[in-house]
Amino acid sequence: MTDGVEGASGGRETWQSRSGVIGRVTGVDPGPLLLCIGGLHGNEPAGVRALEAIVATIASRRRRLRGEFIAVAGNLQALASGRRFLTYDLNRVWTPARVAAARSLDAANGSALDHEDLELLRILDVLDEVAERRRGPVYVLDIHTTSGGGGAFTTASNLPHNKRFAMAIPVPLVMKLDQHLEGTFNSYMDHLGYTAAVFECGQHEEAESRVRAASAVWLAIHAAGLLDWQDAPEAAAAFRALRRAYRGLPRVLESTYRHPIEPADRYRTRPGFRNFQRVRAGDVVGDDRRGEVAVPKTGRLLMPLYQEQGEDGFFVVREVAGVTSETAVVALAGTFPSRG
Ligand SMILES: [Zn+2]
């Protein structure tokens, strides 16, 4: 495409198109590559919508942009039908073994491929392209939404560069979620040596989720080093707005419990539970075929399930002592403009 820009800005590609690439902006100067992906779960379109809306603006800053920005839609077929997935969960298959198996299946017999096999292979094409095109370090932001309400958070693996990248978005960072989940896209990015974080931007249908997704993308653009504060005023505005909105919540938490479920359990969360709601051990939060389901630990509830598909009924998280909202802000102060 012409002039280092392609995708939504030119109207040539939308998320329904085969490649799934929403847009790609190549800066004049070499630098880091930031890959933003939304909709790995098809009932979570907020990230895709946010990326579609801001690619043109990012493209307009191309002359000041270092490196490259790529926005991608995750599970195209599931997005089209509004379901989390069609055959299997596209955010639980990213183990080196499953990836290798999908590649060899593709080479051996394309007709045996499931819906999500095709999506996996398409995203692998994008990742191969990223590995080829990169002219510096690679950063990845994976954008999701949750079925329960109650606000946004980030997650990252327990490596300093990943935590630093996640904390550029001033919402709670939840650690150790990856201990419970195998084969997430984020874990595969870790495996590839990329700096990666997940942003859960709110409830699936909440209008604010799309706004928060856009905020996180701008903050990631700045944190990855593609644009300075003065060339990304949206990032500074996003930092202020999110910091203000999430001041009352712990800055860093960790998962202490996951309630795994299977369809045969017929698990249902009772109405009214929200992310970060305080719970005490023994509180009943749901029901399944065996009766009442209580939380086994005191803490805060995370991702209470309010949809049909999913393997996690809820998580319990607890605050990590010693990291307050203020100390985290101080840690970032060196990079944040002091006024405005
Ligand atoms: Zn998701």
Image: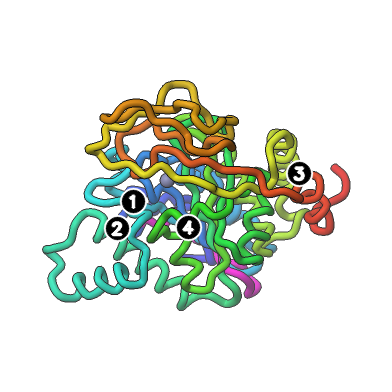
- Image coordinates of residue 9 in percent, x first then y, are 50, 51
Mark 3 is on which residue type?
A: Ser
> Can residue 325 be seen by looking at this rendering?
yes
Q: Are marks 2 and 1 in contact (CB under 8 Å)?
A: yes
- Is residue 25 part of the magenta span, yes or no? yes
Magenta segment, principal secondary structure?
strand
Q: What residue is pinned by disc 2?
A: 119
Residue 284, relative to residue 142: is it above or below? above
Q: Which residues are magenta?
A: 20-34
Establish if 225 lies above or below 256: below
Image quadrant of residue 221? Answer: bottom right
If you read the primary sequence from the N terminus, does the residue marked by circle 4 or circle 3 appear first? 4
Element at badge 4?
helix
| Residue type marked 4 | Gln
Helix, strand or loop at label 2? It is: helix
- Kindly check if marks 4 and 1 are in contact, taking CB atoms under 8 A apart as contact: no
The percent coordinates of residue 314 (x first, y second) are 44, 38
